[in-house]
Image (tube, rainbow, N blue to C red):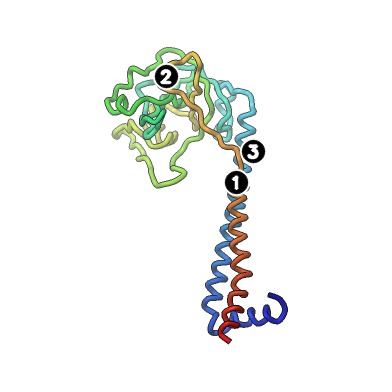
Amino acid sequence: MTGEPVFISLRLMFSRRWIIATLLVLVGLGVLVRLGMWQLDRLQQRREFNARVQAQVERPELALDGAALLADLANMEYRQVAAVGAYDFSQEVALRNQAEGGRLGVHLITPLRLKGSEQSVLVDRGWIPEEDFSSGNWARYEEPGEIQVRGVIRRSQSQPDFGWRSDATPVPGGERLAAWNFVNVPAISQQVPYALLPVYIQQAPDPTWQGLPVRSQPHLDLSEGPHQGYALQWFTFAVILGVGYPFFIYRREKAGA
């Protein structure tokens, strides 16, 4: 459709008969283009996240002592870390709704009092079955004495990636919360009688460790995801609508002539 038919279609688009439909199409075009731009923004965010994570994964293991305790640990998420200390099981909590091998359970989150320091750090020691959590039978999973923990640094979390779950904030002197939806370090620290580092350690599996708790590491997907394809899809829809609408008007008017 070129030349005079194009001019006729463009003129008819803003006639009284077609003006409402044209406005709706223009709104639709705006929405489609915005969705495409949003996916490109998501792609850029994904690339930045991947670059940051890859940089931390490739760094050498960090010994969590001395000057390292003053570092910006929150920006070192997924870096390998090693810490030595003793667990305080009196302040242990559970992370709800954790699955392992198709079974529901919890992860045990335990403060580690770091050797040679007044500092402590939460450690995700791994998964135990739901029935042991419900019965309160956690003592069987204690690891007493001085221990070395290896794993990766994880950021505190206060809200889900999707949904609206949340945790109550403990009140000083109030009831202690034994189970949490997230490893929310600032909130958990409200019920712990000493300072906690702003991050936690997710303990890595150890070939010499058999049984429970089951250690695990985060699954890192460092691909770019589907965002580029989705952006192309939305832009394609916009082109089809933008080109097809004038053609549709021309055909309808010609058929009714």
Relative to 166, is 7 above or below?
below
The first of marks 1 and 2 along the sequence is 1
Please provide percent x and percent y for residue 225.
Answer: 58, 44
Name which quarter of the figure residue 58 lies in. top right
Nearest to viewer (mark 2 / mark 3): 3
Which residue matches tag 3?
51
Q: Is the C-beta separation of discs 1 and 2 under 8 Å?
A: no
Tag shown at residue 87: 2
Q: Is the C-beta separation of discs 2 and 3 under 8 Å?
A: no
Nearest to viewer (mark 1 / mark 2): 1
Tag shown at residue 45: 1
- SS type, badge 1: helix
Which residue occupies 53% across, 76% down? 21
In this picture, residue 192 sits left or right of residue 147: left
Q: Amino acid at mark 1?
A: Gln
Q: Amino acid at mark 2?
A: Tyr
Please provide percent x and percent y for residue 250.
Answer: 61, 79
The first of marks 2 and 3 along the sequence is 3
Please provide percent x and percent y for residue 204.
Answer: 51, 23
**Gap in Å between the C-alphas at discs 3 and 1?**
10 Å
- SS type, badge 2: strand
Which residue occupies 37% across, 25% down? 128
Name which quarter of the figure residue 87 lies in. top left
Which residue occupies 60% across, 83% down? 254
